[in-house]
Image (cartoon, rainbow, N blue to C red):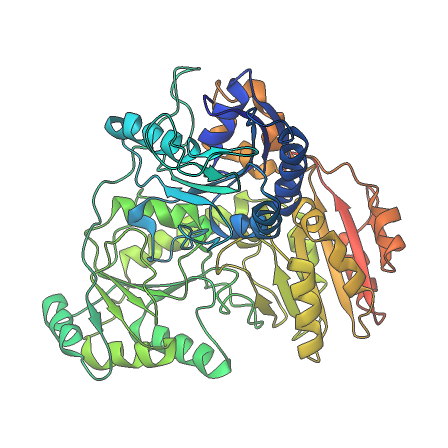
């Protein structure tokens, strides 16, 4: 804080937990929690403009956010700060190098993301305790070059560098897990994740199948197979049927996440397992081969299993690398349909009769579905029309859908936002989806996600076709309570910075923007409310309040 940072507008996330904690612990910094990153940046900019009027008294304001698309919301404020000459510091948390370019969630190329609209930018690189002094020196050296008001051409900073007119600065700070402070207030952990970049990627395709041929020889007859389908695993009915038929031929167990396109197929396909109910260890034997389709699965259970079973051969099928663990044996660079055909041609599948693995997995799955109980997402799914579209938000909603809904008696078409896995623009995206398809559209999202895109309800009010927005309102930001941060004693005094309650009179806001509003009262049926909303054209918002622990 030696460079005059006095104000911070923080938008809570997981990856920027160490930054929020450090700012909150410093008595000289005024900290505000602001859900919307765009608003946070402009709030900090307003403070910075007011405090930058006195030459020689340079005080910085910061906006601080998590990794992924969050930082992109800072762009308009940084453009204004650049042209105005305001001391605005954009601090973006980031993922470490080992998670870049391998399909990790909320991971985009952040260094340089603001182009020429910052006066300076520093990417601090991977966090290591022995680099702390050098990291601090880099930041201080960057901020030291700026001054307010008039200065003499050629004048130098105390460290000997040229002085520049003040303006916005981008500070990109990668963190590895654990993200919570160690102990109480002794300091922020700089991460204890896996070091190194893991296995180098090997790629095969239809024109160069040599590595696939080699893999087939090394594996020999393959008995037990898991096909794990993450977001966007299949595109179109032909690929759906191709995967299902291949699984039947191979005797494979299909584990399909809710966003894969392979979960809600109708016909009561209860044999399709969900990834978030994924059994860890226990009496479930390892498969001979794992085939991963689509983007990286959302499930934390899957993440833990891969970490613990890196020796199990795993093949990723897709045009881009989707292997944050960097432990896959091979990537087949092809669409899902072509990739499955190549595997069929070069791997010898020999399904086991009475497989102990399948029996154990079936028992584990049965116990999972018996234990989950009722949940609002089940009622929503049960009320959706045959063949309709379901848009799914991020954070808790996508995980609840995966963990509580084994399937549907009706065929549903699911669309997600798992590219950068942000909560941005979900309402506007659903409006656009509704304009491009004929079947009804339902959007399922949380209250913080709706708040982030509340202005787009004005767009939704123009909808002529049926559009139903279901808001699961748990009091804001409850996913953080389920993360390790929620159990950290050091973060407890500042927990309000992560809770992000949304103090909104939703009826007045929604109806004021021209959208029908329906609140589900205690004891009423969510499925009846959703079913009724699908009976009328235009947009209806169904507001479902649930306990904060949900």
Does 169 sit above or below residue 54?
Answer: below
Q: Nearer the viewer, residue 111 or 492?
A: 111
Q: Nearer the viewer, residue 28 or 272?
A: 28
Q: How many marks?
A: 0
Give the image location of residue 336, x and y in percent: 37, 75
Task: From the viewer's perspective, tell me whether residue 246 is left or right of residue 485.
Answer: left
| The quadrant where residue 199 appears | bottom left
Give the image location of residue 316, x and y in percent: 30, 65
Q: Nearer the viewer, residue 470 or 69?
A: 69
Task: From the viewer's perspective, tell me whether residue 466 is left or right of residue 261.
Answer: right
Task: From the viewer's perspective, tell me whether residue 208 is left or right of residue 370.
Answer: left
Residue 488 visible somewhere in the drawing: yes
Does 178 sit above or below residue 315?
Answer: above
| The quadrant where residue 150 appears | top right
Residue under the point 67% across and 79% down: 437
Q: Nearer the viewer, residue 146 or 467?
A: 146
Q: Quadrant of the C terminus?
A: top right
Does 479 sit above or below residue 379?
Answer: above
| The quadrant where residue 537 appears | bottom right
Residue under the point 82% across and 74% down: 464
Residue 35 visible somewhere in the drawing: no
Give the image location of residue 501, x and y in percent: 69, 35
């Amino acid at each position: 804080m030696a460079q005059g940072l006095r104000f911070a507008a923080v938008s809570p996330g997981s990856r920027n937990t160490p930054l929020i904690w450090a700012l909150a612990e410093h008595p000289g910094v005024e900290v505000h929690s602001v859900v919307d990153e765009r608003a946070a940046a402009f709030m900090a900019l307003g403070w910075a403009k007011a405090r930058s009027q006195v030459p020689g008294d340079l005080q910085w304001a910061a906006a601080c956010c998590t990794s992924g698309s969050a930082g992109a919301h800072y762009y308009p404020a940084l453009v204004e700060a650049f042209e105005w000459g305001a001391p605005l510091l954009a601090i973006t948390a980031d993922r470490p190098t080992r998670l870049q370019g391998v399909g990790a969630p909320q991971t985009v190329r952040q260094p340089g993301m603001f182009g020429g609209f910052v006066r300076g930018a520093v990417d601090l690189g991977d966090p290591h305790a022995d680099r702390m002094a050098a990291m601090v020196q880099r930041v201080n050296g960057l901020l030291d070059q700026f001054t307010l008001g008039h200065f003499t051409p050629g004048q130098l900073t105390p460290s000997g560098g040229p002085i520049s007119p003040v303006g916005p600065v981008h500070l990109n700070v990668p963190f590895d897990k654990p993200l919570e402070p160690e102990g109480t207030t002794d300091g922020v952990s700089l991460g204890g994740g896996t070091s190194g970049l893991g296995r180098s990627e090997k790629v095969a395709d239809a024109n160069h199948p040599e590595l696939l041929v080699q893999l087939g020889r090394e594996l020999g007859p393959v008995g037990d197979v898991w096909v794990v389908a993450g977001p966007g695993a299949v595109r179109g009915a032909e690929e759906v049927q191709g995967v299902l038929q291949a699984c039947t031929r191979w005797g494979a167990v299909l584990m399909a996440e809710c966003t894969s396109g392979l979960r809600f197929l109708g016909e009561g396909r209860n044999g399709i397992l969900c990834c978030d109910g994924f059994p860890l260890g226990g009496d479930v034997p390892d498969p001979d081969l794992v085939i991963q389709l689509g983007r990286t699965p959302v499930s934390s259970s899957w993440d833990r299993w891969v970490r613990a079973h890196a020796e199990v051969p795993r093949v990723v099928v897709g045009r881009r690398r989707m292997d944050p663990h960097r432990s896959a044996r091979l990537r087949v660079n092809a669409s899902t349909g072509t990739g499955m055909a190549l595997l069929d041609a070069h791997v010898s599948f020999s399904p086991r009769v009475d497989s102990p693995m399948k029996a154990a997995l079936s028992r584990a799955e049965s116990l999972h579905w018996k234990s989950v109980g009722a949940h609002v997402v089940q009622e929503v799914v049960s009320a959706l029309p045959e063949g309709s579209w379901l848009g799914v938000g991020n954070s808790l909603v996508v995980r609840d859908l995966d963990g509580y809904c084994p399937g549907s008696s009706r065929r549903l078409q699911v669309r997600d936002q798992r590219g950068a896995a942000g909560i941005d623009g979900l309402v506007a995206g659903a409006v656009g989806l509704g304009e491009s398809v004929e079947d009804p559209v339902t959007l399922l999202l949380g209250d913080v996600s709706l708040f982030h895109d509340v202005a787009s309800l004005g767009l939704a009010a123009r909808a002529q076709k049926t559009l139903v927005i279901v808001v699961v309102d748990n009091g804001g930001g409850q996913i953080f309570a389920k993360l390790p941060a929620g159990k950290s004693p050091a973060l407890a005094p500042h927990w309000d910075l992560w809770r992000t309650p949304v103090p909104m009179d939703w009826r007045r806001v929604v109806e004021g923007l021209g959208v029908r509003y329906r609140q589900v009262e205690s004891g009423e049926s969510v499925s009846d409310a959703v079913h009724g909303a699908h009976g009328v054209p235009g947009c209806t918002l169904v507001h479902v309040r649930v306990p904060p622990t949900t």
